[in-house]
């Protein structure tokens, strides 16, 4: 078992080396398998984030179902081999939003602030595994699932290090206009963190007509992922 305090160091080091191959998906729900199979040709480091409790079982079930035998001569890595490598206190430190609210969103009402600062049941799981992608290729991926709030995690993993994931997935809106963080809204909270990171994602993934971010050049379309088409967008090339 690895040093229980090393998970964040490992993840942050991997992001600093390979942020251009990272897929970040806040408000993911239990939507793990499809992104892993369809985006592993672009990314090999996947971070799924959703602060709703109860996703751990679904995550491990899907990881176990999707993993395949590695190429000959490479040992199998158990999907939950790093699942408990972060102490409970460190989980709460990672999930705690006191810093981001103080620095970026001091205007948040106190009732909402108290709820955000003290998250209910933060958890994390981490897996390294081989999968078969949607084109039949065998690929190695690193996958983190964080039962935590997505804007805060973006700040801690990307903005503070002037990084951005290669693909930012906003397939789930994250709430209505009255909520803390409507991800599909360019004027929402996540946009401020993206702009403060000094780096922007190469691609944006969202349901068609369900965002107003300035990524408008269509790269790919996925018609079998949701009840309506999901599109992968890039920013318009500057002339």
Image (cartoon, helix red, strand yellow):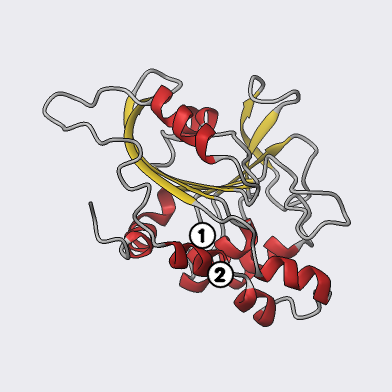
Nearer to me, 166 or 63: 63
- Is residue 158 visible from the viewing direction of this image? no
Which residue is depicted at the point 25% across and 23% down? 69
Where does the image place residue 55, in percent across and percent down from the top left?
57, 40
Which residue is depicted at the point 33% across and 63% down? 13
Quadrant of the image occupied by residue 132: top left
> How dense is the environment of label 1, judged by Cα within 10 Å: few (below 14), some, or many (20 and up)?
many
Which residue is situated farthest in the left direction here?
73
- As measured in the structure, the alpha-carbon distance from the residue carrying label 1 to the one carrying label 2 is 7 Å
In the image: residue 40, left or right of residue 176: left
* 111 over 221 or under it: above or below: below
Where does the image place residue 140, in percent across and percent down from the top left?
31, 35
* 200 over 166 or under it: above or below: below
In the image: residue 219, left or right of residue 64: right
Tell me whether the residue at label 1 lies in contact with that at label 2, contact meaning CB atoms closer than 8 angstroms. yes
* 231 over 115 or under it: above or below: above
Question: Pointer 2: what residue?
Answer: 197
Q: Which of marks 2 and 1 precedes in the sequence?
A: 1
Q: Which mark is residue 164?
A: 1
* 102 over 230 or under it: above or below: below
> How dense is the environment of label 2, judged by Cα within 10 Å: few (below 14), some, or many (20 and up)?
some
Where does the image place residue 224, in percent across and percent down from the top left?
64, 19
Quadrant of the image occupied by residue 120: bottom right
Which residue is depicted at the point 77% across and 46% down? 211
- Secondary structure category for the residue under label 1: loop
- Secondary structure category for the residue under label 2: loop
């Amino acid at each position: 078992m690895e040093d229980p305090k090393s998970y964040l160091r490992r993840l942050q080091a991997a992001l600093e080396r390979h942020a251009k191959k990272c897929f970040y998906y806040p408000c993911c729900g239990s939507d793990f398998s499809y992104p892993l199979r369809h985006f592993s040709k672009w990314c090999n480091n996947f971070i799924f984030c959703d602060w709703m409790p109860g996703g751990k079982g679904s995550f491990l079930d899907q990881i176990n179902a999707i993993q395949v035998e590695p190429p000959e001569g490479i040992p199998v890595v158990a999907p939950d081999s790093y699942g408990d490598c972060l102490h409970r206190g460190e989980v709460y430190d990672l999930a705690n939003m006191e810093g981001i609210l103080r620095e970026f969103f001091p205007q948040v009402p106190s009732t909402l602030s108290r709820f955000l600062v003290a998250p209910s049941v933060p958890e994390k799981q981490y897996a390294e595994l081989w999968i078969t992608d949607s084109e039949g290729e065998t690929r190695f991926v690193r996958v983190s699932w964080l039962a935590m709030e997505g804007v805060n995690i973006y700040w801690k993993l990307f903005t503070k290090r002037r990084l951005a994931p290669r693909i930012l997935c906003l397939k789930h809106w994250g709430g209505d206009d009255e909520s803390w963080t409507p991800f599909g809204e360019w004027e929402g909270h996540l946009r401020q963190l993206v702009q403060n990171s000094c780096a922007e994602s190469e691609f944006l993934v969202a349901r068609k007509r369900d965002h107003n971010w300035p990524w408008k050049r269509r790269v790919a379309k996925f018609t079998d992922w949701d009840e309506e088409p999901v599109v992968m967008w890039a920013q318009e090339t500057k002339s």
